[in-house]
Image (cartoon, rainbow, N blue to C red):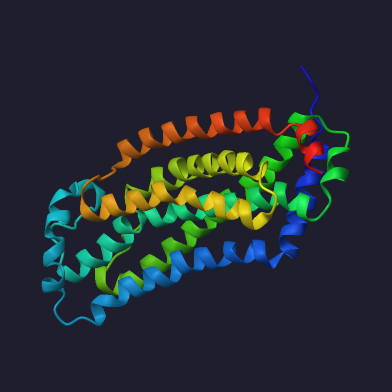
Amino acid sequence: MRNWNWRGMWAIVAKDLKQVRQNTMVWTPMVILPILLQVILPLVMILLPRMVSDMGSELSDLEPLLAAIPAELLPGIREASPEVVWVMLTSAYLFAPFFLLIPMMVTSILAADSIVGEKERKTLEGLLYLPLTDQELYLAKTLVSIIPALVITLVSFLLYTLVVNAAGYGVVGRVFFPTPLWWPLVFWLAPAVAVAALGATVLISSRATTYVQAQQSSGLLVLPVVAWMVSQATGVFIMGPGMMMLVGTLIWAIGIWLIWLGSKTLSRSRLISQV
């Protein structure tokens, strides 16, 4: 059994994270996105009933969607007032797909900078001559992306939980979040999406020449999430916890395959030819 050079790999991780902190173009979106999606938008939607006099008429167009949602996804919503229905529907159901944008975008931002950023900073050549194997170098670069992404995802979930319960307590009258839908979303599907985004971005970054080019290409990864947003909001496709576990398993398989493919593609000799 081979001995991995963990000291060398963690040195790369520490170096890259330091560079991330110094690069505002990289870390600024990772701060703005969670604040926008987990604080500002939920607050606007939750406080909306206090600004609308007749919430019941406003919800009339959503009756087909409410009828299609299984009762166990939003406990107590069938007997609730229109104001409570709105708060629970938006914060605990309609905002669920938005949450996946955080691990996806954070991972793609870090992965793009971790590889193509080395090319732009002219530090790739020195990195390639470190006493690490191709597999160790690749693993270090994946850790640079996946660890912060998972940490930011978890912190965002905790922040969202506090914001939703604090802002919605005056309407709902109790702590109502997280609902059953969110546990597999946060702890199974979100990490799977992060791994898949990492694998795809590494493949893109290995061929891109600039950070902006890599980031723009990886931006296409949000299209499946947008499709889920639309289908969920219209009631065409409602993903419960069981389906979410199944979809998460599929995405895990795709992500692991993409990372394996990237480990074969991102070889030392290939990168040296790009210096």
- Horizontally, is 38 left or right of 91 in the view? right
- Residue occupying the far top of the picture: 1
Total numbered labels: 0
| Residue 123: percent from left, percent from top | 84, 50
Question: Residue drawn 47% across and 68% down?
Answer: 36
Quadrant of image for the C terminus: top right
Left or right: 229 with respect to 265? left
Residue at figure coordinates x 63%, y 41% from the top left: 202
Query: Residue 201 occupies which quadrant of the picture?
Result: top right
Q: Nearer the viewer, residue 74 or 123?
A: 123
Vertical order, 45 against 160 (above or below): below
Residue 135 sits in quarter = top right
Q: Is residue 241 left or right of residue 198?
A: left
Residue 166 can be seen in this image = no
Rendering coords of residue 93 (x, y %): 30, 55
Q: Is residue 102 left or right of residue 120?
A: left
Q: Work out whether 22 lies above or below 260.
A: below
Query: Residue drawn 70% across and 34% down?
Result: 266
Image spot of residue 2 (x, y percent): 79, 20
Counting from the top left corner in percent of width and height, residue 229 is at 33, 53
Going 77% across and 58% down the picture, which residue do you hit? 18
- Residue 59 appears in the picture as rendered: yes
Q: Quadrant of the N terminus?
A: top right
